């Protein structure tokens, strides 16, 4: 079923969406995204390959259609966003694809509450840099005959499963946020769609929220959500 073209509120919204999609496709050429429209805000959900988290980017639209809930190819959507000669011009929505399992198990829209213990933004960036360096050092120290996929995965699991600061958020969530460009320093003001509900207010510090089994690291550029039991456990309502 065809959908009316989507018009970003400004060229910055289109550029940020393109950057988000480009990163997803970089990690997985066959990446899919689920699009959900609420009012004039389009939530774009993706799962960066190998990180076991969901990445979420919200785009503010002008003249949004009445409804939209569709899983599409991230690469095809990126091509449509790039196809417009004028930045911020309306772009089409690809045809629906058969969604991967994660696309049916999304974080709740409401019921989020603040969680304590999240380090400051600079400390989060430093923590990510430290564990990336540790992973590289430990894997490079392995003898060639011991540098197997099993050994590398074991080291990675031990490192990426560690909690971030005094929280229950695994370090892999912060690493994923870094990979998606969500940890970069924020400007004085950010687009209204970058942080749902903030209406273009001055950028707030990073925040950690929880809702049921979900944890969400929110930044001015997007969010990363992870289930405490991992995305492989689909013990929640499918929508």
Image (tube, rainbow, N blue to C red):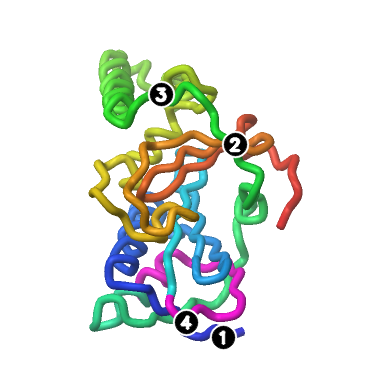
Q: In terms of depth relative to the viewer, which is nearer, 118 or 180?
A: 118
Q: Position of residue 124 (x, y in %)?
A: 33, 28
Say which mark, if any, is on residue 2. Answer: 1
Give the labeled residue for mark 2. Answer: 113
For the N terminus, the image quarter is bottom right
Q: In terms of depth relative to the viewer, which is nearer, 4 or 80?
A: 4
**Quadrant of residue 139 in the image?**
top left
Mark toward the viewer: 1 or 4: 4
Give the labeled residue for mark 3. Answer: 152
> Along the horizontal axis of the image, is 87 left or right of 79?
left
Mark toward the viewer: 3 or 2: 2
Kindly report the distance in space between the C-alpha atoms of the residues bearing marks 1 and 4. Answer: 16 Å
Q: In terms of depth relative to the viewer, which is nearer, 4 or 156?
A: 4
Kindly report the distance in space between the C-alpha atoms of the residues bearing marks 4 and 3. Answer: 49 Å
Give the labeled residue for mark 4. Answer: 63
Kindly report the distance in space between the C-alpha atoms of the residues bearing marks 2 and 4. Answer: 31 Å
Magenta region: 62-79
Q: Position of residue 187 (x, y in %)?
A: 23, 49
Q: Are marks 2 and 4 in contact (CB under 8 Å)?
A: no
Secondary structure category for the residue under label 3: helix
Kindly report the distance in space between the C-alpha atoms of the residues bearing marks 3 and 2. Answer: 36 Å
Q: In terms of depth relative to the viewer, which is nearer, 41 or 231?
A: 41
Tell me which label, 2 or 4, sits earlier in the chain: 4
The residue drawn where x is 31% and y is 46% is 181
Residue 70 in the magenta stretch? The answer is yes
Secondary structure category for the residue under label 1: loop
């Amino acid at each position: 079923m065809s959908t009316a073209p989507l018009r970003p509120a400004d060229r910055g919204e289109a550029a940020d969406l393109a950057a988000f999609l480009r990163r997803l496709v970089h990690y997985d050429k066959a990446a899919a995204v689920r699009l959900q429209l609420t009012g004039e805000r389009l939530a774009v959900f993706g799962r960066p390959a190998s990180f076991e988290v969901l990445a979420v980017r919200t785009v503010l639209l002008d003249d949004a259609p009445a409804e939209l809930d569709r899983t599409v190819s991230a690469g095809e959507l990126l091509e449509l966003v790039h196809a417009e000669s004028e930045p911020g011009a309306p772009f089409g929505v690809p045809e629906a694809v058969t969604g991967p399992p994660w696309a049916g198990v999304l974080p709740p829209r409401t019921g989020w509450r603040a969680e304590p213990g999240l380090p400051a933004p600079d400390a989060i960036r430093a923590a990510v840099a430290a564990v990336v360096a540790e992973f590289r050092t430990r894997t490079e120290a392995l003898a060639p005959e011991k540098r197997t996929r099993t050994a590398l995965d074991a080291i990675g699991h031990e490192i990426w499963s560690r909690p971030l600061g005094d929280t229950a958020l695994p370090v892999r969530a912060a690493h994923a946020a870094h990979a998606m460009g969500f940890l970069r320093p924020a400007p004085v003001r950010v687009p209204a769609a970058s942080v749902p509900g903030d209406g273009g207010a001055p950028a707030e510090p990073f925040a950690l929220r929880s809702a049921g089994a979900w944890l969400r690291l929110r930044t001015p550029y997007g969010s990363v959500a992870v289930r405490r039991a991992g995305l492989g456990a689909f013990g929640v309502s499918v929508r």
